[in-house]
Image (cartoon, helix red, strand yellow):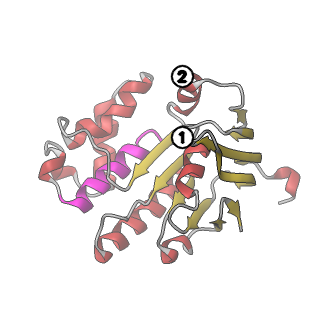
Amino acid sequence: MSEKEISYAIETLSMAKKIQLKNNQPLSILDDITLQIPQGSSVAITGASGSGKTTLLGLLAGLDAPSSGDIKLLGQSMLNLDEDQRAALRLGQVGFVFQSFHLMNNLSALENIMLPLELEQTHKDPRTMANEALEQVGLSERADHLPTQLSGGEQQRIALARAFVNQPKVLFADEPTGNLDQATSNEIEKLLFQLQQDNQSTLVLVTHDEALAEQCQIHHRIVDGKLA
């Protein structure tokens, strides 16, 4: 495939992120980040603690705005979009998986998976779709369990089902195995890549785990706020 034929899920151009310290001095977190992420690819972002990798993930997802430069998500520039407009762009097209699961403790496993479908308000039968997603991650028998009644690995499986239930075009994962033991991590990694391939989603993940990063097709490292 030629360069012109490649379709990109995410593109950035000379993106930078600075914050203002209490002494009114600017602190550069990211500087001159230019990258292209092809649709359907798997991309890992690694770096030392404080290198800016989680900040980069948030910017690529439109959870934060850069100080300068531009970011295109699914072909849409986010340069002049406010927070609500960026949220509307993500709705039904972007999924998230977090290290600490971020499940709603007052909702059952099934209800947690139904949540993004109900927010999108375009699906006729969210319950059936959520049950199918539960089956995909092997937890049909846990449908009525609350998150506090599930193990860490089971909670992350529910989080994966919730993230993929509406077949997102892009999935962002922030340390998806960071709170799990090695055996459970291996299971979650296998499931994550399987769901990504089944849904033909673009996967962008931040991790400290070099072995996990090497399973991705593309591996970016951040050193002192720059892509190395």
**Which x, y percent locates residue 212?**
49, 72
- Tag 2: residue type? Asp
Looking at the picture, tell me which residue is in the foreground, 134 or 101: 101
Name the residue furthest front: 23
Q: Which residue is mark 1?
A: 22
**Which x, y percent locates residue 107?**
20, 36
Looking at the picture, tell me which residue is in the foreground, 131 or 174: 174
Q: Which residue is mark 2?
A: 84
Residue at 54 percent across and 33 percent down: it is 90
**Is label 2 in a helix, a strand or a loop?**
helix
Asked if disc 2 and disc 1 are in contact, CB closer than 8 Å, the reply is no
Q: Earlier in the sequence, mark 2 or mark 1?
A: 1
Residue at 15 percent across and 44 percent down: it is 146
Residue 142 lies left or right of residue 96; in this view the side is left
**Is label 1 in a helix, a strand or a loop?**
loop
> In which image quadrant can residue 88 be found?
top right
Residue at 42 percent across and 21 percent down: it is 121
Note whether residue 123 is visible: no
**Which x, y percent locates residue 78?**
68, 32
Note whether residue 225 is visible: yes
Q: Is residue 34 above or below residue 72?
A: below
Residue 139 lies left or right of residue 216; in this view the side is left
> Is residue 194 part of the magenta span, yes or no?
no
> Is residue 156 part of the magenta span, yes or no?
yes
- Tag 1: residue type? Lys
> In which image quadrant can residue 214 be found?
bottom right
Neighbour tally class for label 2: few under 14, some 14-19, many 20 plus, Cα within 10 Å: few
In front: mark 2 or mark 1?
1
Q: Is residue 107 above or below residue 33?
A: above
> In which image quadrant can residue 70 be found?
top right
**Which x, y percent locates residue 45?**
58, 62
The boundaries of the magenta stretch are: 151-167
